Image: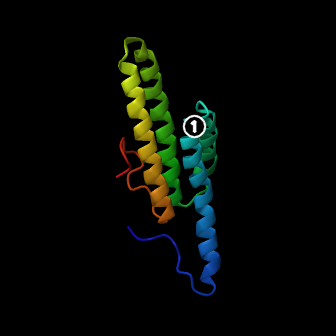
């Protein structure tokens, strides 16, 4: 895939600033998801709202991050609920641990791709978007 960050020559500096600004909200969403482990998920709810609100007005490469984030939220919610229910018989704790690792990996991959001005290659993926 081609890089989405414009070159930084002369008048292109304003384009670089715009590209950097486009990354800010999805970056905040990834961070809110990670902080969600410490806040019982409240910041995760705020993050998914940001992703839904900003997805349609973003360029395609940023939209891929929002789609990835929204999918991360809904899959986490479903698996998290399953883990809580199955905690009664003990196996749920393993599911919740795996969910935490999966979420961290997806956030790290997303932040890494954002720092490179790259889209998520497959935002519909169940794994790390590749």
User: Counting other residues with Cα less than 10 Å from the Cα at mark 1, is it few (<14), some (14-19), or many (20 or more)?
Assistant: some
Residue 86: x percent and y percent? 40, 16
**Residue that appears at 64% across and 39% down:** 46
Is residue 56 visible in this depiction of the protein? no
How many marks the image carries: the answer is 1
Q: Can residue 47 be seen in this view?
A: yes
Q: Is mark 1 on a helix, strand or loop?
A: loop
Query: In the current view of this chain or complex, which residue is farthest to the top?
Result: 88
Q: Nearer the viewer, residue 83 or 14?
A: 83
What is the quadrant of the N terminus in the image? bottom left
Give the answer, above or below, for where 104 lies relative to 63: above
Residue 17 occupies quadrant: bottom right
Q: Nearer the viewer, residue 58 or 82?
A: 82
Q: In this view, does 52 lie above or below 5?
A: above
In the displayed structure, does residue 39 sit left or right of residue 98? right
In the image, is residue 75 above or below residue 64? above
Which residue occupies 37% across, 12% down?
A: 89
Q: Which of the 4 quarters of the picture holds residue 52?
A: top right
On the rendered structure, is 96 left or right of 53?
A: left
Is 40 situated left or right of 64 in this image? right
Residue 124 picture quarter? top left
Q: Nearer the viewer, residue 119 or 93?
A: 93
Residue 68, position as x, y percentages in the image: 47, 47
Residue under pointer 1? 36
Name the residue rendered at 50%, 60% in the picture: 114
Question: Furthest residue to the bottom?
Answer: 10
Is residue 23 shown above or below 80?
below
Q: Identify the image's colour scheme: rainbow, by chain, secondary structure or one colour.
A: rainbow
Residue sitting at x 58%, y 60% = 23
Residue 83, given in percent of the width and then of the height, sits at: 42, 22
Residue 14, x across and y down, in percent: 65, 77
């Amino acid at each position: 895939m081609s890089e989405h960050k414009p070159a930084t020559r002369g008048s292109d500096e304003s384009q670089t600033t715009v590209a950097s600004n486009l990354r800010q909200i999805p970056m905040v969403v990834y961070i809110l998801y990670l902080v969600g482990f410490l806040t019982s998920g409240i910041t995760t709810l705020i993050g998914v709202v940001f992703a839904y609100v900003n997805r349609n007005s973003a360029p395609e490469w940023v939209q891929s991050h929002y789609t990835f984030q929204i999918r991360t939220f809904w899959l986490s919610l479903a698996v998290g609920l399953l883990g809580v229910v199955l905690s009664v018989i003990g196996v749920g704790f393993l599911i919740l641990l795996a969910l935490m690792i999966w979420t961290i990996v997806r956030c790290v991959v997303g932040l890494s791709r954002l720092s490179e001005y790259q889209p998520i290659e497959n935002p519909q993926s169940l794994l790390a978007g590749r």
